[in-house]
């Protein structure tokens, strides 16, 4: 199966975000990855539901929205209404992970769980029946442009085994420091979806297709 590529618009030119979303759509992106940061759960502040709503008309590809915010529950319906197709929340962001996942599913969209680098994959043990996507953070969340943490390859392999033991079609996504030089290792470890920011948005839009294909290997 060909790996999916989810360019992170965190690395796009925010002055022309609609154009950038259209450009990566036309360049072959499978998902449009939207990083939402609150300045509390992670040390950065990015965008809210209104930006998701604004970019929704610019693509028919799934909007893959990663909520790096805490508390998260109050924002789940807002991002769903704004046009998110997948909402991924952090296992570390609140005390009631299963309840939060149920809330996402009640909005009629796909639910994902993300794990920070220091979080053990056992955090997933009792929510495997509630998730459609698992996101392994291969950098500490908060900023783009960080280097991939090699220890996360073992976590990816372990989670791939967990998914293999279930009958459900759960996607395994990896985000952080993914580039053409390490994408093959990440895919070999079991990733279905690669999130990449600077590796895609390097050069002008004419380069985006080449950048995306380089990640597919």
Image: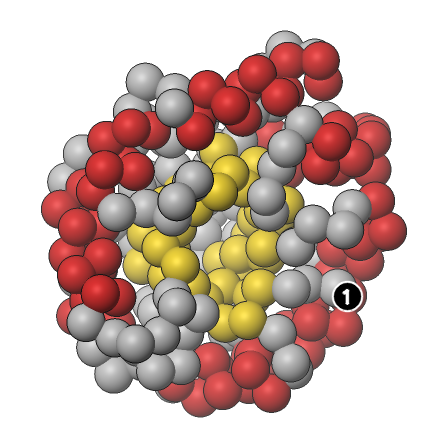
Residue 124 in percent (x, y) is at: 26, 72
Closer to us: 155 or 215? 215
Q: Which residue is tagged 1?
A: 82
Q: Residue furthest toward the front?
A: 1
User: Is disc 1 surrounded by few (<14), some (14 to 19) or many (20+) residues within 10 Å?
Assistant: some
Residue 134 position by quadrant: bottom left
Closer to us: 167 or 205? 167
For the N terminus, the quadrant is: top left
Q: How is the image coloured?
A: secondary structure
Q: Residue at the spot x=21%, y=59% of the render?
A: 159
Q: Residue at the spot x=78%, y=46% of the render?
A: 59
Closer to us: 14 or 179? 179
Q: Is residue 213 above or below residue 31?
A: above
- Residue 24: in sight, yes or no? yes
Name the side, left or right, on which 103 lies relative to 16.
left
Q: Tell how many labels.
A: 1
For the C terminus, the quadrant is: top left
Q: Residue at the spot x=41%, y=74% of the render?
A: 131
Q: Is residue 99 above or below residue 189?
A: below
Residue 140 in percent (x, y) is at: 33, 44
- Residue 20: in sight, yes or no? no
Q: Residue at the spot x=79%, y=35% of the render?
A: 22
Q: Is residue 181 above or below residue 74?
A: above
Residue 115 in percent (x, y) is at: 31, 59
Residue 176 in percent (x, y) is at: 38, 37
């Amino acid at each position: 199966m060909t790996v999916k590529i989810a360019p992170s618009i965190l690395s796009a030119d925010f002055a022309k975000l609609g154009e950038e979303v259209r450009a990566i759509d036309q360049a072959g992106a499978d998902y449009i990855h939207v990083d939402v940061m609150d300045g509390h759960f992670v040390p950065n502040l990015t965008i809210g539901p209104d930006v998701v709503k604004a970019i929704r008309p610019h693509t028919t590809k799934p909007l893959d929205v990663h909520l790096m915010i805490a508390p998260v529950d109050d924002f789940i319906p807002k991002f769903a209404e704004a046009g998110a197709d997948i909402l991924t929340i952090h296992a570390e962001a609140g005390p009631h992970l299963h309840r939060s996942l149920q809330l996402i599913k009640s909005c009629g969209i796909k639910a994902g769980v993300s794990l920070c680098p220091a979080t053990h994959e056992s955090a997933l043990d009792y929510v495997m029946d509630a998730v459609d996507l698992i996101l392994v953070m291969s950098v500490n969340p908060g900023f783009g442009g960080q280097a991939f943490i090699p220890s996360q390859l073992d976590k990816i392999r372990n989670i791939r085994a967990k998914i293999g033991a279930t009958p459900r079609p759960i996607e395994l996504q990896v985000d952080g420091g993914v580039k053409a030089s390490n994408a093959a290792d990440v895919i070999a470890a079991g990733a279905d979806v690669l999130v990449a920011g600077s590796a895609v948005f390097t050069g002008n839009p004419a380069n985006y297709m080449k950048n995306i294909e380089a990640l597919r290997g």
